[in-house]
Amino acid sequence: MSKRAGANRKNQKAKHSSFGHKLQKLKIKLNKLEKRKFWKAHLFWPKFLRKPKIRFLSSRLKIQIPIPNRTFMFVISLVLVAFSIAGGAYNIVNKTMPPLGYNDPTNGPPHPDFFYPDMNKQYLLEGIIGFALIFVGFVGLIFIHQSTKHFYRPNYSYMLLTIGIGLMLFSFFSLVRIVTIEKQIEMYSDIY
């Protein structure tokens, strides 16, 4: 065997060992990221959902991607939900609707109209009111969920359950009232 062939084999082994060493370091970093302690300390996640295994390392750039604060992410997600429920896309696209309408009385000053009497159009304030009522119903669901955690304190559990059911019913009937009376749309017409 020539000296040149022996030197090439040593270089190949050195390259393999350095690549293997880098791969081992990468696996150690990924294992640290996937540990439960890391997730609990740095990222909000509901306990009833399985946590996905996400790799936060960019293999090409060899840099770590920073994980944002969990409170910040929760606020951002609430803002996106509020925007979609309140009809934010409709309000951005439709420039002809004012934020608040006014009726045209024959005598006296005009009174504000919070709800447009059509299902396909809305005022800006109408979307905000709808979101607030849906949020009240969501808070009712949270109260009901919290009541199941206090099983051994029945009085407190029943109080939370009652408040949660009350908030959900208030939210539902308020939204039905808005649709039937304020927007003048017949719902459940087959029942009557």
Image (spheres, grey):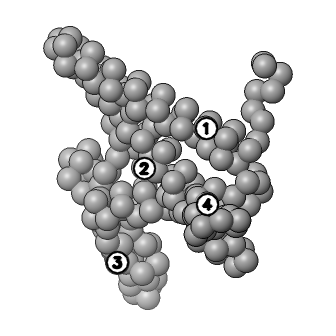
Tag 2's secondary structure?
Answer: loop
Q: Viewed as shown, does residue 67 lie left or right of 121? A: left
Tag 1's secondary structure?
Answer: helix
Q: Quick one: label 2 or label 3, which is nearer the N terminus?
A: 2
Give the residue type at disc 2. Answer: Lys
Mark closer to the observer (2, 4): 4
Q: Alpha-carbon neighbours of circle 4 within 10 Å: few (<14), some, or many (≥20)?
A: some
User: Would you name the residue on which mark 1 appears?
Assistant: 177
Using the image as rendered, state which of residue 55 and residue 6 is in the foreground: 55
Using the image as rendered, state which of residue 8 and residue 53 is in the foreground: 53
Coordinates of residue 73 in the picture (x, y in percent): 36, 62
User: Would you name the residue on which mark 2 appears?
Assistant: 53
Q: Quick one: label 2 or label 1, which is nearer the N terminus?
A: 2
Q: Quick one: label 4 or label 1, which is nearer the N terminus?
A: 4
Q: CA distance from mark 4 to mark 3?
A: 55 Å
Badge 2 vs badge 1, beta-carbon distance below 8 Å? no
Coordinates of residue 88 in the picture (x, y in percent): 59, 66
User: Would you name the residue on which mark 4 appears?
Assistant: 113
Badge 4 vs badge 1, beta-carbon distance below 8 Å? no
